[in-house]
Image: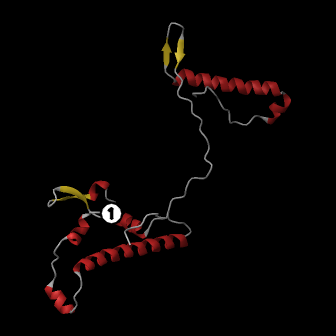
Amino acid sequence: MGNLCAFDTNPLDPTAYSNSLEECLNDAARDCAQALINQVLTTLPMKSASDGVYAELPDPTTPLPREKPLPKAKEPTKWELFAKKKGIKSKTKDGKLVYDEEKGEWVPKWGYKGKNKDGEGDWIVEVDGKGEKEKGEDKNPRALSREERKDRIKKNERQMKKNEKRAAAGGKSLATRGGRVGKR
């Protein structure tokens, strides 16, 4: 509309086209021009000036067809199927920060300087005496908390690979995730 151009995608009648070419083309051009003028007069805002009445044309646009087909929807993971079945909704991004009363500021729940790493930087770590006596081992409590966190990360990566293999076996592939879950 912005280029004042009309396209008629209807096919021409082959018998009329072969009998009188000029008349057929004139009829098609007249119909297109009439459709364009009707659209201008009915849909566009009009302005009157001392020279006459003007129609404000919209910005010109040229719609192009897609080069490739629309992407197919990825197959849901086991967790997504379970969450949908149970009615579990994903958390919003607002819930990623937690107020730390000791520091007096908002800190991330997970990750760099996150609340999950609170005990790792302390200068003293409490040790459960009973548990240590029963096991009979002396282990570094700092290393234990770090190992537990690393184990959770590895478990998550294994589950992610399982989901990708399961989706590939079903014929659809999951989008690969480029980033890592944690440091190694």
Residue 25 position, x and y percent, is 77, 27
Number of numbered discs visible in the structure rendering? 1
In this rendering, is residue 27 above or below 139? above
Residue at the (20%, 93%) spot, across then down: 136
Viewport quadrant of the C terminus: bottom left
Residue 24 position, x and y percent, is 78, 27
Residue at the (33%, 63%) spot, across then down: 88
Q: Amino acid at mark 1?
A: Ile
Is 49 situated left or right of 108 in this image?
Answer: right
Choose top left, top right, bottom left or bottom right for residue 5.
top right
In this rendering, is residue 156 above or below 110? below
Residue 64 position, x and y percent, is 61, 41
Is 53 situated left or right of 142 in this image?
Answer: right
Residue at the (14%, 86%) spot, across then down: 129
Is 8 situated left or right of 116 in this image?
Answer: right
Q: Residue furthest right?
A: 19
- Determine which residue is flagged by label 1: 88
Q: Secondary structure at mark 1?
A: loop
In this rendering, is residue 86 above or below 26? below
Q: Nearer the viewer, residue 72 or 15?
A: 72
Viewport quadrant of the N terminus: top right
